Image (cartoon, grey):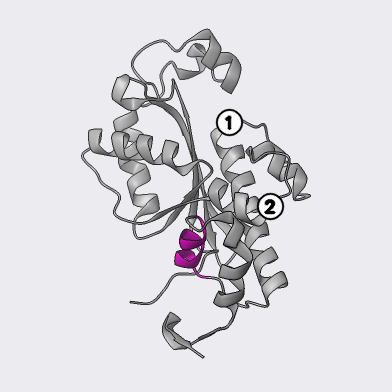
Amino acid sequence: MQRKLAESVVVLDFETTGLSPEYGDRAIEIGAVLLEEGEIVGRFQKLMNPGFRISQFIEGYTGITNEMLKGQPCCEEVMAEFSEFIAGRNIVAHNAAFDRRFLDFELKRAKRAYEGSCCCSLLVSRRIYQDSPNHRLQTLVSHAGIRQTGVFHRALADAEMTAQLWLSMIERIRRQYGMPTVFFDQLCELSRVDKLYTHRYLTNLAAVKTGEEGGDVRA
């Protein structure tokens, strides 16, 4: 099977009523950008009516109000549409465990499923930007010198900033380790490597000669 490039992914973000779909929390907004070879070629953004009033805390945190959610489509309708947007593509999210929980939960309610792979930009950033004060998205965007667009804690703006962070980490790996091509599965593996061994892992990876069709042959 041909390996997929790290910069050809869907980067997504959910805004939700809380932390735990298993305890009744629901998605209220989804934002995503489609990257093809490092360029944004598509966007997806929808508000969703969860079927109940959201708390004042969530209104303040996200800027999404109960008034804004009135008349919006239900989660099931939006997620059925979103399932087409992500079909056949890998996913990136910042703190991906959170977004993956809501993705799987809401897709299941919509009688859909996602069968691709998901990589966490937060975990990768802990290895690439070890000198960052912390690894919150807003801090990393500033640390990496990325121009800020939109408002943090709105789904599409967060997805776009995560996409730029993701691309900045790929570029840093290319520049520092002389790797012209970075594959998605390599960054997934990097996210699981002890951060103390990041340099060793990437140095060894750079020594691998990439063959045709994404296969690799060790020198």
Compared across the picture, whether 158 is left or right of 30 comes to: right
Vertical relation: 125 (above or below) 184: above
**180 or 37, nearer to the observer:** 180
Q: Quadrant of the N terminus?
A: bottom left
Residue position marked by numbered label 2 in the rendering: 129
- Nearest the viewer among 72 and 9 is 9
Closer-to-camera residue (14/79): 14
Name the residue located 34 percent from the left edge and 50 percent from the top edge.
84
161 relative to 189, above or below? above
Of the residues shown, which amino acid type is indicated by label 1?
Answer: Arg
Q: Residue at x 58, y 83 (%)?
A: 207
Q: Which residues are magenta?
A: 183-191
Q: Amino acid at mark 2?
A: Tyr
Crowding near the residue tagged with mark 1, few <14, some 14–19, many ≥20 C-alpha atoms within 10 Å:
many
Residue 181, x across and y down, in percent: 57, 76
| In the displayed structure image, the side of residue 218 where residue 152 appears, left or right | right
